[in-house]
Each structure stands twice: as structure tokens, then as C-alpha cells.
Amino acid sequence: MANFHCRAVCNPKRALNNVFNPLKLRPIYRNKLTILCDQPDQNKQPRFEAFKRDNGFLELNSQLHVLNVNGLEDYYPEHLATVCTRRDKVKKAKWMAHNITQSDFENQMPIIFNALNHCWMNAYSSDPVEQLHITDTLHIKIPTEAEL
């Protein structure tokens, strides 16, 4: 595991493929994957296009979600981002987690929200009642006690 992590971190060109290839080769996981990526910069765009071309089923099955910004820090709702001026990514993420509302997340972060919904819709569950129900508008609905 340490060697795999080192190769992925030391060679970011291959990081996505190093993580993705073992999963896509297993039929049980291939259609269950949900990938969320930052928008690649100009230097990474050709490699990203090659990745998408080599794995066309990801876009065809709506398994690939790409932010319209270069990083999560730039995707937070603007009214929260102007209040939280922390530079440390981890501290900023924790602040956002404590201050973002469900409405902010669903309406102002739709790419991540849709990726999360995709995960839930494609998750394996031994008991369908344990699985979250997804409404037609992709809002997550937790089952009530009466539904259990």
C-alpha cells in the first residue's frame, strides 16, 4: 500500500489511473464508480482528455463529475467563502462543514451534490430499506420510521 501511495503521489500524471484501473477491471465495481475531479489546468487537460477517451463509459454512464473550478476551495458557496478567509485547506473545509446549510450544498454546489447522489444510487446494499431513497429531483430523502 505504501508503494502504491508513493507512486501515485510522486507521479501525479498517473495518480488517477493508478487508483482507477484496478477498479474498472473488476466488473462488480466498474459501473459503481463515481469520480469527482477538479477542472484540470492547461498542462493536465491533454492527459485528462486521454483518460476520458480511454474510459468513455464514465461519461456515458454519468459516472464522471468535473468541477468547473481548479479546486474544491474555489467551489464553496460565495457568501461563505467571503466570510471564511482561512488559507489552510483543512481548516477551511472544517469551517465550511460546520457552516454550510443543506440548501446551500444542494443548490450552490450542484456538481458535488449530483456526484454524491450518484454514489448513493449506485451503492450496494444488502437491505434496500437501509439504502437512502432518491427522489426524482435528486434530493436525498432519509426513510422515516414508518417506511422502515
Image: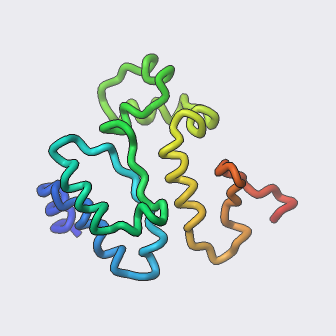
Which is nearer the eye, 96 or 27?
27
**Location of residue 35 (image quadrant):** bottom left
Residue 45: image location, x then y, percent = 22, 48
Q: Residue furthest bottom?
A: 27
How many labels sit on residues?
0
Residue 87: image location, x then y, percent = 30, 25
Q: How is the image coloured?
A: rainbow
Image height of 65 relative to 129, above or below: above
Q: Quadrant of the N terminus?
A: bottom left
Image height of 40 relative to 51, above or below: above
Residue drawn at 35 percent across, 36 percent down? 69
Residue drawn at 39 percent across, 30 percent down? 92
Image height of 3 relative to 112, above or below: below
Residue drawn at 57 percent across, 73 percent down? 124
Residue drawn at 39 percent across, 43 percent down? 67
Q: Residue furthest top?
A: 83
Lateral position of residue 21 relative to residue 36, left or right: left
Which is nearer the eye, 54 or 8?
54
Image height of 19 relative to 108, above or below: below
Q: Quadrant of the C terminus?
A: bottom right
Lateral position of residue 13 relative to residue 63, left or right: left
Residue 25: image location, x then y, percent = 33, 80
Residue 112: image location, x then y, percent = 48, 46
Q: Residue furthest right?
A: 146
